[in-house]
Image (cartoon, helix red, strand yellow):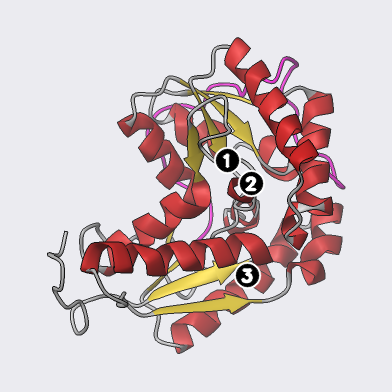
Amino acid sequence: MPAVGEPVAGRSKHAGLLAHSTEGAALAFLAYCQEGFRRLGRHEHPDVTLDYIAFGYSMPAWEAGDHASVRVTLATSVARLARAGADFFACPDNTAHIALETPGPDLALPGLHIADVVAGQAASDGRTRIGVLGTTYTMDSRLYPEALAARGIAAEVPDADDRHTINKIIFAELVNGLVTEGSRQEYARIMERLAARGCDAVALACTEIPLLVTPEVAPLPTLDSARLLARAAYDVATGHHAMPTWRGGPRARSGHAAPCNSGRPHRKPQPGQ
């Protein structure tokens, strides 16, 4: 880690933030910049560029299960980040990684994978069973079960009614910057149910959830995907972590994915979820 006052200009990498939702991207951008302030002791951080094609344009494709079309949109943003001088990208949107993992041409830049970042922190913390909260797309996907299982960690998701509640609050409130005490209590209740099922931490696998669920109100330790990704990007930019090599498409991970336990047999996501 650089000493306080140590300059980073001239030797750091240029980070590109690939946005796919407003509030989560803004949180990750702030966290990235604040990491520089925290480590350097002044208003400095490695160069960062954010590119955002409004996610509303991609919602019809998400609802139709057309991940390839969403990938094309995200690839356009990555290409624009490359033209802006970014050396790598980080996408502060968990659901977007479903589309990024869809087979296709290599993206213009290598990128960090948010589920791998979160799973790595869970392993460092010694966690054994992680509850996963996010959009229905994310909770019904293999993103987190595979990333966690590669590190010997089990994944749990809430039951169907609770998944519906989580998803509704994300899209009706959190992506619009609306935070209510009633929704905070609903999330806490759901986390308590996951604790009763043996979870020792919860992944906030939607980058807007940390706006609602903060560590001091959470009934379980939390893994904040927005801030963890921002810090990982900062470490890459400052040379404290190796440059990523993933350029989209299926991830090659060690280990085998255990089933994601939701209290019912696992099924593939259906269009419109």
Q: Of discs 1 and 3, which sits in the foreground?
A: 1
Amino acid at dot 2: Ile
In depth, the one of 246 and 126 nearer the eye is 126
Badge 1 vs badge 3, beta-carbon distance below 8 Å = no
Q: Please provide percent x and percent y for residue 187.
A: 70, 33
Q: Which residue is mark 3?
A: 74
Q: Quadrant of the N terminus?
A: bottom left
Magenta region includes residue 263? yes
- Residue 153 position by quadrant: top left
Residues at marks 1 and 2 touching, judged by CB atoms closer than 8 Å:
yes
SS of the residue under disc 2: helix
Residue 163 position, x and y percent, is 77, 32
Three-letter residue code for mark 1: Leu
In the rendered image, the vertical position of residue 30 relative to residue 46, given as above or below: above
Image quarter in which the C terminus is found:
top right
Please identify the quarter of the rendering in which residue 165 is found: top right
Q: Which mark is residue 209?
A: 2
Magenta residues, start to end: 247-273
Mark 3 Cα shell of 10 Å, populated few (<14), some (14-19), many (≥20): many
The answer to whether residue 164 of the structure is visible from this angle is yes
Q: Distance of mark 2 from mark 3, alpha carbons?
A: 22 Å
Q: Nearer the viewer, residue 187 or 233?
A: 187
Q: Position of residue 216 (x, y in %)?
A: 52, 35
Q: Secondary structure at mark 3?
A: helix
User: Which residue is labeled 1 in the image?
Assistant: 204
Q: Earlier in the sequence, mark 1 or mark 3?
A: 3
Which residue shows up at 78% across the image and 57% down it?
66
Asked if the magenta segment contains residue 60, the reply would be: no
